[in-house]
């Protein structure tokens, strides 16, 4: 069984942003925190509309959602094939972003020992085009063990009355200390 570490949690966070109150995402779905929606396992995220939460609570929910709703899919897909910390982190990030790990041909190709084909297939998961940077980093993490996080996350405020994230409000927030404190307790 693989373990969720602060390093893995921070790696995924490096690809995301945090919004401490409920917002409407690009698909007009209510989301909150680190892209958490009702369907990701923390229901009624709209309760946080106009009610910003603490960084600690946002990260606590994020870790619980990863453990309960995303890690099992990674464990199932790679059963019988041990993963390093970096491989597990990359696969978990991929699942958190796409939800498509069980359909991804790169998993089967990697398990068959064909790293070259698996790498190429991994990079076919680049829609929309804005995701290429994330996918490249996940690929480098899985196949080369190259970590890209620095212990920070981008934080964004919500614009009113649209309830959309305001890109002009982006700032960087350190999260490593909070995650390291939370992980032994979650």
Image (tube, helix red, strand yellow):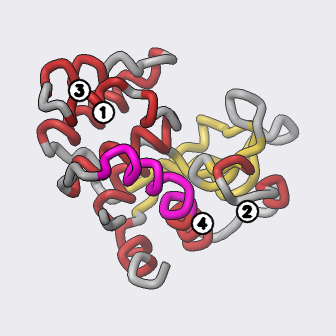
Classify residue 79 as left or right of residue 163: left
Classify residue 83 as left or right of residue 129: left
Q: Split into 4 quadrants, where in the image is the N terminus?
A: bottom left
Task: Give yes or no for residue 100 being in the magenta stretch.
Answer: no
- Residue at image mark 2: 52
Q: Tags 1 and 3 in contact by the CB under 8 Å rule?
A: yes
- Residue at image mark 1: 107
Residue nearer the viewer, 72 or 30: 72
**Distance in Å between CA atoms under marks 1 and 3:** 5 Å
Mark found first going from the N terminus, 3 or 2: 2
**Distance in Å between CA atoms under marks 3 and 4:** 33 Å
Q: Is residue 77 visible to us here?
A: yes
The residue positioned 68% from the left and 28% from the top of the image is 26
Q: Tags 3 and 2 in contact by the CB under 8 Å rule?
A: no
- Residue at image mark 4: 61
**Distance in Å between CA atoms under marks 1 and 4:** 28 Å
Q: Tags 3 and 4 in contact by the CB under 8 Å rule?
A: no
- Residue 168 appears at what percent x and percent y? 60, 36
Q: Nearer the viewer, mark 1 or mark 2?
A: 1
Residue nearer the viewer, 27 or 80: 80
**Distance in Å between CA atoms under marks 2 and 4:** 14 Å
Q: Secondary structure at mark 4?
A: helix
Residue segment shown in magenta: 65-79
Classify residue 142 as left or right of residue 53: left
Mark found first going from the N terminus, 2 or 4: 2
- Residue at image mark 3: 109
Mark found first going from the N terminus, 1 or 2: 2
Q: Secondary structure at mark 1?
A: helix
């Amino acid at each position: 069984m693989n373990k969720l570490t602060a390093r893995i949690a921070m790696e995924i966070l490096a690809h995301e942003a945090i919004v401490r109150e409920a917002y409407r995402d690009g698909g007009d779905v209510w989301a909150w925190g680190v892209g958490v929606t009702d369907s990701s396992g923390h229901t009624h995220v709209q309760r946080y509309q106009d009610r910003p939460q603490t960084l600690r609570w946002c990260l606590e929910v994020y870790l619980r959602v990863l453990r309960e709703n995303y890690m099992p899919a990674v464990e199932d897909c790679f059963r019988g094939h041990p993963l390093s910390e970096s491989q597990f982190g990359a696969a978990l990030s991929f699942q958190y972003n796409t939800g498509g790990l069980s359909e991804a041909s790169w998993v089967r190709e990697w398990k068959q020992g064909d790293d070259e084909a698996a790498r190429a297939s991994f990079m076919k998961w680049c829609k929309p085009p804005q995701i290429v940077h994330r996918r490249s980093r996940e690929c480098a993490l899985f196949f080369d063990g190259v970590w890209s996080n620095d212990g920070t996350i981008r934080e964004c405020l919500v614009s009113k009355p649209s309830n959309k994230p305001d890109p002009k409000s982006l700032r960087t927030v350190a999260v490593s200390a909070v995650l390291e404190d939370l992980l032994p307790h979650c």
